[in-house]
Image (spheres, rainbow, N blue to C red):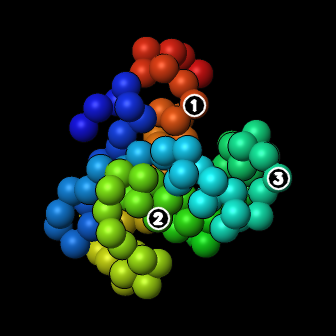
């Protein structure tokens, strides 16, 4: 895993997967969540006004950006290591790493 590339690990069904928000993954996420811009997308999560559906879409985009061949149905039924809290933390870290340098303080 390389934080300089924006990578974050997520464990699904006991197997670690690398997530990454590539430009294509961000475009997929914008379309899925029907946001008008990257800023609107980030603000949605930063403000805490995101739903479980939004989190699943973020994780799915990150997994696909990291090279996983996974669909929403498979993610919906997967056992996430650490549960919902770990999923939310991984999603937050994924967004942070996509838009800041690893050594930058927020």
The mark found on residue 60 in the picture is 2
Is residue 14 among the parts visible in the rendering? yes
Callout 2–callout 1 Cβ contact below 8 Å: no
Query: Earlier along the polypeptide chain: callout 3 or callout 1?
Result: 3
Q: Residue at x 72, y 43 (%)?
A: 38
Crowdedness of circle 1 by 10 Å Cα count: few (<14), some, many (20+)? few
Q: In this view, does 33 lie to the left or right of 64?
A: right
Q: Residue at x 42, y 21 (%)?
A: 102
The mark found on residue 99 in the picture is 1
Q: Which of 75 and 22 is in front in this view?
A: 22
Q: Is residue 47 left or right of residue 22?
A: right
Q: Nearer the viewer, residue 84 or 74?
A: 74
Callout 3–callout 1 Cβ contact below 8 Å: no
Find residue 20 and report its horizontal and vertical position in percent: 41, 46
| Quadrant of the drawing holding the N terminus | top left
Which secondary structure, mark 3? loop
Which secondary structure, mark 1? helix
Task: Measure the alpha-carbon separation of dots 2 and 3.
Answer: 19 Å
Q: In this view, does 86 lie to the left or right of 2?
A: right
Residue ID for mark 3 = 36
Which secondary structure, mark 2? helix
Find residue 55 and report its horizontal and vertical position in percent: 56, 62
């Amino acid at each position: 895993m390389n934080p300089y590339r924006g990578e974050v690990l997520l464990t699904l069904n006991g197997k670690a997967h690398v997530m990454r928000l590539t430009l294509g993954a961000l475009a997929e996420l914008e379309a899925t969540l029907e946001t008008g811009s990257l800023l609107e997308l980030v603000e949605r999560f930063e403000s805490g006004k995101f739903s479980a559906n939004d989190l699943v879409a973020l994780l799915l985009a990150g997994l696909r950006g990291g090279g996983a061949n996974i669909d929403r149905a498979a993610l919906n039924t997967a056992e996430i290591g650490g549960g919902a809290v770990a999923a939310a933390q991984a999603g937050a870290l994924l967004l942070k790493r996509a838009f800041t340098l690893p050594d930058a303080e927020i």
